[in-house]
Image (spheres, grey):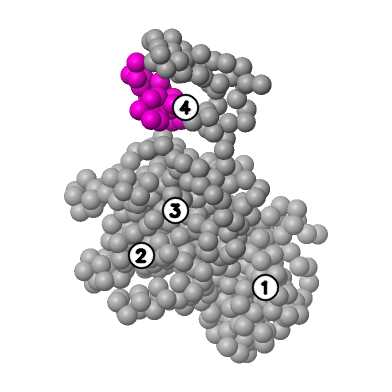
Amino acid sequence: MKPTLKKFKKPAHISELPNGTYFEAGHLVTKNAGWRTKRPVIDIQKCKGCLECYLYCPDGVIGKADGKVAIDYDFCKGCGICAKICKFNAIDMEGER
Amino acid sequence: MAKHFLSGNEAFAYGVRLAKPDVISAYPITPQTIVVERLAEMVEDGSLKSEFVHVESEHSALSCAMGASAVGARAFTATSSQGLLYMAECLPYASGGRFPIVMMNANRSTALPWNIYGDQRDSILMLDSGWIQAYAETAQESLDLALLAFYIAEDKRVMTPFMVNLDGFVLTHTYEVVDVPSQDLVEKFLPPYETENMLDMDSPKNLGYSVGPDYNLEFKYLEHIGIQNAAEVIVEAENRFAEVFGRRYTGLVDAYICEDAEYIMITLGTIAGLCRETADLLRAEGIKAGVLRLRYIRPFPNREIGEILKNSKAVGVLEKDISFGNEGTIYTNVNSALYKAGLDVPSYNFIGGLGGRDISKENIKKAYEHIINGGKKVNFIGLEVNAYE
C-alpha cells in the first residue's frame, strides 16, 4: 500500500517519541522530491496498464488513480527507470523548470 | 537445584542454556572459547533448542545478534579482548537500536604487546558504548548473571544490551561447585521476551532509521534514561531472583565490612576476594579496612559510593586498567561520585594486573598502607623492576 502524506505534530513531551529507532512504517510527514531534474510523464494513450513500471519503481511512487496508472510527484526522484523499462514507450522524461 | 563442578565459562554456558536464547552467534577467542564450545555441544545434543550461527568475525557475531533481536528473538553472543574491539562499531548500534542482547566478555588484555591473559582494558574501553556492564566474581555469580542479564536487559523500562564480564582465566578457567537451578524454577523467574521493537507483518515498522540533528539528542536522552532505569530494575530482578532461587545479590555494589571502615579499597571482578582477605588481616592489626566491589560500572553506582564512603578517611581504587595519559578510568568515575556526594575524601589509584600480572596480598597490603599514609595519587603496583627511583 502506498503511504500518504501525514501532518506532522511536533511532540510536546519526550514520551511521545518512540523509545528507540522503531516506529510505524510509512509514516511520511514531508514531501521528498526536491532534487528531481526530470519528471516522468505517462502518455495515457500509449499506456497498456501492465504496471511493469510499478514493479520497477525503487521508491514505490507509481500506482493507480481513477483506474489509470499515475505517478506521485511528491515522492518521485526522477530516476527514469520507469521510462527505460516501459515496453510501449509510454513514459517520457521531461525537464523540470 | 543440582550441584556441578564448573569453570566460570561453563557456568555461564549453563546459565545461557537455562535462559533459552533463540539465537546464539559467536566467534571463538581465548579465553572465551569454552563458553561457545559448550553451547555448541548443548545445541548438538539437543538440550538447547537455539539457532547456533557460525559467523566469520566478531563484527558479524554482534550484527547477527542484532538481526535476530530485530525479529523479536532472544539473542546471545560472547567475545573477548581484540574480538570486542573488532566488534566495537556494532556496540552503539545495538544500544541505540535498543536491542536487549546479552553478551559475555572474557576480560583480556589488549595488544600491543600481544597478550592473552586477563585485565579489564577491553571492556572499559567500551564503557561509553551504551551497554550495561556487570563484573562477576565467582562461577556461581556468572551463571546467575546470565539469567539476571536477560531479565534486566529485556525490561521495557531498560531495553538496553547487557555485557557480563568474567576475568580471563582467573574466573573463566577456574572450577568451583555451582548450584545449577532447574528449568522449572528458571521459567518462574524469566518471562519470555516480548517487544514492539521488531519486524512484524501485522504491524509493519521502520527499524534502525536515521535521525537528524532535529531529534537525535532526544533519542540519546532516551537511551541514557533506559540505562539509568536499569539501576532500579536490577534491584527488582535480584529481589525476584532471591524469591525464586534463594540466593541474594546486593545491587550495583557489594560492600564488605564497610559500615565502620576508615580505609576502603574499591575494586571490581575477582581480585575483590584477595582484597577482602587483606582487609581481614588489617582488621586483626586494628586497622579499620573495608572493601567495596563494584558489581556494575554502567549504570555507575554514584549514590551507593556516596553513601558507603561518607564516613571513610581515605579510599583506594584498584583496577586492571589504565587510561594512558591520565589515570585508571574507574578512579575517574569514583572521584566524580565522591565530588557529587560532596565528600572531600583523599583517593588513590592503584593500577595493577595488566596483561595477567598477579596482584599479590602483599601488593594489596602495601596499597592499603599507601591509602593510610598518603602519597602519590596514581600508582602502578606490582612492577617487577624499579621504575620509581
- Report the residue marked by disc 4: A71
- Report the residue marked by disc 3: B99
| x then y, percent, for residue A89 | 43, 9
Q: Given the image, what chain letter belongs to the residue carrying mark 3? A: B
Residues packed near mark 2 inside 10 Å, few (<14), some (14 to 19) or many (20 plus): many
Q: Is residue B320 visible?
A: no
| x then y, percent, for residue B65 | 40, 46
Q: Quadrant of the C terminus of chain B?
A: bottom right
- Is label 3 on the same chain as label 1? yes
| x then y, percent, for residue B285 | 61, 87
**Residue beneath the point at 34% across and 59% down:** B194
Disc 2 is placed on an element classified as helix
Position of B99 relative to B82 (above/below): below
Q: Given the image, what chain letter belongs to the residue carrying mark 1? A: B
For the residue marked with disc 2, what is the amino acid?
Answer: Leu
For the residue marked with disc 3, what is the amino acid?
Answer: Phe
**Residue beneath the point at 58% across and 59% down:** A11
- Report the residue marked by disc 1: B337
**Residue beneath the point at 78% across and 72% down:** B375
- Is label 4 on the same chain as label 1? no
Q: CA distance from mark 3 to mark 1?
A: 29 Å
Q: CA distance from mark 4 to mark 1?
A: 60 Å
Sequence order check, earlier mark of 3 and 2: 3
- Is label 1 on the same chain as label 2? yes
Q: CA distance from mark 4 to mark 3?
A: 38 Å
- Report the residue marked by disc 2: B147
Q: Quadrant of the N terminus of chain B?
A: bottom left
Mark 3 near mark 1, Cβ–Cβ under 8 Å? no
Nearest to the observer: residue B368 or residue A59:
A59
Nearest to the observer: residue B257 or residue B49:
B49
Q: Which range of residues does the magenta coloring cover? A: A48-71
Q: CA distance from mark 3 to mark 2?
A: 17 Å
